[in-house]
Image (spheres, grey):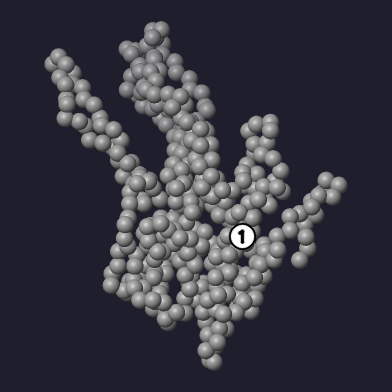
Amino acid sequence: MTNELVKVAEPENDIVDQGGDVVTFAFGDVEPVLDRGRVFDYFELWSNGKWYEPPVSLIGLEKTLHGSPHHESAIRLKVNMLKRFFKPSKLLGMKEFERLALDLIVFGCAYPERIDNIAGRPMSLQRSPALWTRVGKEPGQYFYLPKGNLTDVHEFKAFRVLQIQIPDTKQEIYGVPEYLAALNAIWLNDEATIFRIKYYRNGSHAGYIFYVNEEGFTDEDAKSVKKAMKDSKGPGNFRNMFLHIPKGKKDGVQIIPISEVMAKDEFNNIKSITRDDILAAHRVPPQLLGIVPQNAGGFGSALQSASVFFEHEIEPLQLRMLEINDWLGQEAVAFRDYVPPTTVQGRLIFRPW
């Protein structure tokens, strides 16, 4: 996804020689390869003569969906709440609606295609995957690129596809998702998790130098110690090792630490900070995602949070989906009214459909 976000800077030219063989030099600052500024640094969209390319990599957004559990959970929550109150119709079923809702939230665009019958009247609506759908240069023109294959491009009939979008400030061709400001937080959260996994697989301890200065320590002994240390990596890294050197000195064997990984490991802080940034970008109350509060006060009532969240976040998404009705000239999308669950004798009572 973003494993190459940072590149190592080259050594600076100010190399200083300090007395003969000792040479010191300084590394420059770490330079970001893909930072927030470059992600959003666009003023116009590229066109190949037939269609426009999206302003942000859609493949990157799709991979980012699985980069953080909080990010994906927030998106799935919105999709599930839209499904919960959607009323299927003969033109649009629940499965196609769910796919459209997922595309709209993940990519900022959704593309329902109108399928007509022999008489030329709307028969059903099918979702064209936003990941591979492109907007043509002509009005009402859309293209479908199966998995990005430019040799097998399908052009839809004019005005048979509707684009539902979340508006952007720099262009009006494509929509953009609302969580773009949290992309760096999502990537950092994912990198912190990968670092932690590699840290445990590497033996769950800091690096060190095993220094032996004993006359009775032979090459065969060194190979045996080396093998024992290798075998202690991974799942059995908590084993003890016995080393006996006859007539050994007190400081004949030393463990010299190179770096203390645990002191520099800000895993918990990084996960907490990036989680807050992700939830702020999605504007999802933490109690709706099953996050356990770290203070005694808690997060407050989940029912009240759900009601406010539905009114300010889900209803605007419903309004965007209702654009399908204006496009078709008939009702294909409808939603039930939101009725929060009530509490009776400490038990939650949900409204039956």
Q: Nearer the viewer, residue 308 or 57?
A: 308
Residue 5 percent coordinates (x, y) = 35, 44
Quadrant of residue 297 in the image?
A: top right
Instruction: Name the secondary structure under disc 1.
Output: helix
Amino acid under disc 1:
Glu
Q: Is residue 57 above or below residue 258?
A: below
Residue 344 percent coordinates (x, y) = 84, 50
Count the marks: 1
| Residue found at the far right of this picture | 345
Q: Residue at (54%, 92%) from the top-left corner?
A: 119
Apparent side of residue 109 relative to residue 209 in the rendered image (left or right): right
Mark 1 highlights which residue?
Answer: 315
Report whether residue 22 is seen: yes
Apparent side of residue 132 relative to residue 235 in the rendered image (left or right): left
Q: Residue at (48%, 49%) from the top-left corner?
A: 67
Q: Residue at (69%, 31%) from the top-left corner?
A: 296
Apparent side of residue 89 relative to residue 47 in the rendered image (left or right): right
Q: Nearer the viewer, residue 80 or 252?
A: 80
Residue 251 percent coordinates (x, y) = 38, 9
Q: Is residue 126 above or below residue 27?
A: below
Residue 303 percent coordinates (x, y) = 72, 48
The C terminus: image quadrant: bottom right
Q: Residue at (34%, 12%) from the top-left corner?
A: 214
Mark 1, residues whose alpha carbon is within 10 Å: few (<14), some, or many (≥20)? some
Report whether residue 290 is seen: no
| Residue found at the far bottom of this picture | 119
